[in-house]
Image: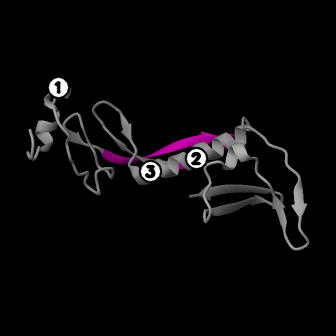
């Protein structure tokens, strides 16, 4: 199978024992964008409702009318992840750390325990979202 271009239809026929050496492949930049093929037909974009503590949020999925499966593309998945994060925050089933707020004469700061920061790198950026006057959501990007 070396140096062979495999068509989409042939991909389902490949078995693990057929791969005997290193295989290089490329994933199309739009591979994770809908519409998707399910049950030999194209999925349709529909709106769904996510209920959370009396609030309703709408989000979109790619839906197969034949088997009723829903698929999320990369953008939809990121949006749905945010809804799940909101649900997690509202459920308050999170690990809570109590830390002192320090002041160095110019700036207030909070120290994080080393168990949390061990994978942080110098030059990382913190994105802080203000949830309320005394509540913040911090995301550290490496």
Q: Which residue is mark 3?
A: 76
Q: Earlier in the sequence, mark 2 or mark 1?
A: 1
Which x, y percent locates residue 66? 27, 32
Residue 137, quarter of picture = bottom right
Residue 129 vertical placement versus 11 (above, below):
below
Q: Residue at x 30, y 30 (%)?
A: 67
Which x, y percent locates residue 42? 24, 44
Residue in the foreground of this view, choosing between 110 and 13: 110
Q: CA distance from mark 1 to mark 3?
A: 35 Å
Provide the secondary structure element on which disc 1 rests: helix
Kindly tell me whether residue 19 is visible in this rendering: yes
Q: Residue at x 69, y 61 (%)?
A: 129
How many other residues sit within 10 Å of disc 2, few (<14), some (14-19) or many (≥20)? some
Label 1 close to label 3 by CB (< 8 Å): no
Image depth: mark 2 or mark 1 in front:
1
Q: Residue at x 10, y 47 (%)?
A: 5
Provide the secondary structure element on which disc 3 rests: helix
Residue range corresponding to the magenta coloring: 44-58
Residue 83: image tag: 2
Residue 75 shown left or right of residue 55 in the figure:
left
Asked if residue 51 lies in the magenta stretch, the reply is yes
* The C terminus, quarter of image: bottom right
Q: Residue at x 26, y 51 (%)?
A: 27
* The N terminus, quarter of image: top left
Residue 70, quarter of picture = top left
Q: Which residue is mark 1?
A: 17
Residue 94: image tag: none
Which x, y percent locates residue 40? 19, 37
Residue 52, quarter of picture = top right
């Amino acid at each position: 199978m070396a140096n062979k271009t495999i068509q989409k239809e042939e991909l389902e026929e490949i078995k693990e024992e057929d791969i005997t050496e290193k295989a290089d492949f490329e994933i199309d930049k739009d591979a994770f964008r809908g519409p998707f093929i399910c049950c030999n037909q194209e999925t349709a974009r529909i709106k769904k409702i996510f209920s959370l503590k009396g609030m309703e949020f709408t989000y979109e999925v790619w839906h197969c009318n034949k088997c009723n499966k829903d698929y999320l593309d990369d953008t939809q998945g990121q949006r749905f992840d945010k809804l799940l994060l909101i649900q997690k925050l509202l459920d308050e089933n999170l690990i809570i750390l109590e830390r002192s707020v320090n002041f160095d004469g110019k700036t207030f700061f909070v120290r994080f325990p080393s168990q949390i920061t061990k994978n942080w790198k110098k030059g990382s950026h913190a994105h802080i979202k203000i949830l309320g006057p005394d509540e913040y959501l911090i995301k550290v990007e490496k």
